[in-house]
Amino acid sequence: MKHTYLILLISFICILFSARSQAQLTPVVDSIPMTDGRKLAVDIYIPTTITLGPVILVQTPYNRQFYRIIGLPLQIGMNVDSSHYIFVIADWRGFYGSAAAAYAGAPSLGNDGYDCVEWIASQTWSDGNVGTWGPSALGRVQFQTATKNPPHLKCICPLVAAPTYTYNEYFPGGVLRTEYVEQLDALGFGLSPILMAHTIHDIVWTYSEYSTNYPDSILVPCFMIGGWYDHTIEQMLPFFNGLRTLSPANVRDKHRLLMGPWVHGGHGISQVGSSVQGELSYPNATHWNDSLALLFFDYHLRTISNNWNLTPFVQYYQMGENVWQNSTAWPPTGPVNTNFYFHHNNDLNIYSPTNSGDSLSLNYDPNNPSPTNGGPTLRTDLNQGPYDQASLIESRNDILIFTTGVIPQDIVMKGNAVVHLKISSNKSDTDFDIRLTDVYPDGRSMIVNDGTLRMRFRNGNTATDTAAMIPGQIYDAVITLPNTAITFLAGHKIRVDVTSSNYPRFNRNMNTDGPMYPGNSMDSLINPAIANNTVYMNTVNFSYITLPLVGFDGIETANSLSDKIHVFPNPILQVVHFSGVSEINEIILRDIFGRELKRFSLNHGDYFLFDVSEYSSGIYLVEFVSQNGMISKKLVKY
């Protein structure tokens, strides 16, 4: 499998840039001596216009020679002479041209980075100002290099990367990210044996999380670039916050964060900074990463007075509205947590259920799991980014779908959505998977993000936390989704898909409380069982999603029944008239804080009058409760 994925990756790059292959770049090929006497292979690109200049170092495990074909980064491409920078691209120790430098006990990548920076600074063509750039693994190594504090390192620019190795990165909700680890193995990192030996949070993870979380050790300005469809969001954002609070005072205000509407990249046409992202397009975000990175380098490496120091600490793309916005931190101030409740008729709205016994069930067969379609994937044979879930996922019979009505006004979300489920199962262990989607007027259900929870880990991820379920007993399942910034536009709907698998993005549960990965296999099924899983949505046990919303005034979303009901006059002085209420069982008047003021039972007539003269001026909500659910209208009292 490793060779298959690597061949796919190499083939894609060769095909994509075949038109350029007739004019490949010709670097100066050299090697950099390390402190242990071994050497790293490097390609050096010096524009003819530079005799002495600043240098951008790229350290890669993916073969430095690819840049000869695809061109240099930061939109320089094949036109080396357009660059204001010299580029040095080095193969990591143990990879490609530097394969012979590997041995047990060799210096760390950070130490190698130190040696590279200081060697560059000593060359006749270098002015001593060195910065680093690169995405993913090429970003992670920049943090490792920076912790060694090479004297001539002036700044770093890691993309879709953080230095931390956390349990939740590989086992979110206690579930192995199958396709992610498979792809890392395919690229030569070989992490699966280590991960399979530590599938529960233990002392190894505690040490890893502590030792790789070192914002206080970053002594140079850092420009972190990420994407809302990337899988590293939940590692990047905490680390950036750490940089802003824990790095030395003289550099603390020099760090910047850019979050765009981008995927992780690595294959396909969707990359950090490209216009096309999955099945959507964001033309006004194209190459923002490159433009701002060049301003960052110009300021710190070329000492150009371009006002980079005055730029916002955080710049982020608000999807839906498709605009760039600024903040002093992430998450920005302003969002208020708002609950949207699940209902037995598959409605999703801001009112808690009124019936006492409602629930819905789904079957989950490990031999026929709900398939992955888009999202923050990595494996080269999977779609990456925003893809429609309607035909492939939501058409199946192993899913519960909860959807708002058509929203009459934009709903602005910034931060983490959290799903709170009340569940039971007829098995002793199972999974619950969430997909949050944006439903377009044409019916497309575009994934925003997703999350998972293995029920044995419902109380935590350590060995003492884990516990089997008692079949039929009701439990809490809390699933926190990754950070995002999206505006659900008027005319759209908000949807939550609930399944018990999302495969191969996440390992499929065999629905037993036995070993999760028998034989240390990342994807084995031994005597799997079909689970019948129930989600509760009633007055005692209710399920909901909490959305961090900005400026949401509590007005419920519109649907077909809402269109029939009319409230007039509105605003009102004394008597309000309700028409089109023949399907309504109850009318409830609430204040703006949701407190019940009055409740009426209806006899299924089509018309109803209500005297509001006793109430003070202000905004009220009127709930209309029917057999099929609940909607609301805003009422303004003079």
Image (tube, grey):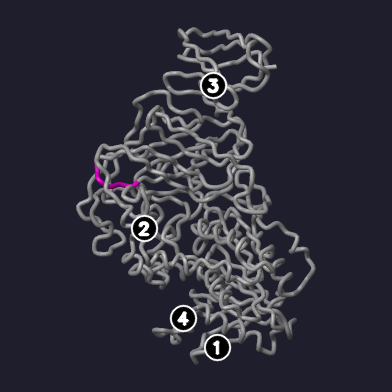
Identify residue for label 4.
96
Dot 1 or dot 2: first in sequence order is: 1
The outermost residue toward the left is 527
Q: Secondary structure at mark 2?
A: loop
Residue type at numbered disc 2: Leu
What residue would you read off at disc 1?
31
Residue type, mark 3 in image: Ser
Crowd tier of the residue under label 1, counting other residues whose Cα lies within 10 Å: few below 14, some 14–19, many 20 or above: some
List the residue tagged with mark 3: 562
Are dots 3 and 1 in contact, CB under 8 Å? Answer: no
Does 610 sit above or below residue 364?
Answer: above
In which quadrant of the rendered image does the N terminus lie?
A: bottom left
Query: What is the spatial separation of the Cα atoms under label 4 and label 3, in whole angstroms?
Result: 64 Å
According to the picture, the residue beneath numbered tag 2 turns out to be: 176
Q: Residues within 10 Å of mark 3 (few under 14, many from 20)?
A: some
179 with respect to 211 (left or right): left
* Mark toward the viewer: 4 or 3: 3
Nearer to us: label 2 or label 4: 2
Which of label 3 and label 2 is nearer to you?
2
Q: Which mark is residue 154?
A: none
Comes first in the chain, label 1 or label 4: 1
Magenta-colored span: 427-431
Say if 198 sits above or below 37 in the image.
Answer: above
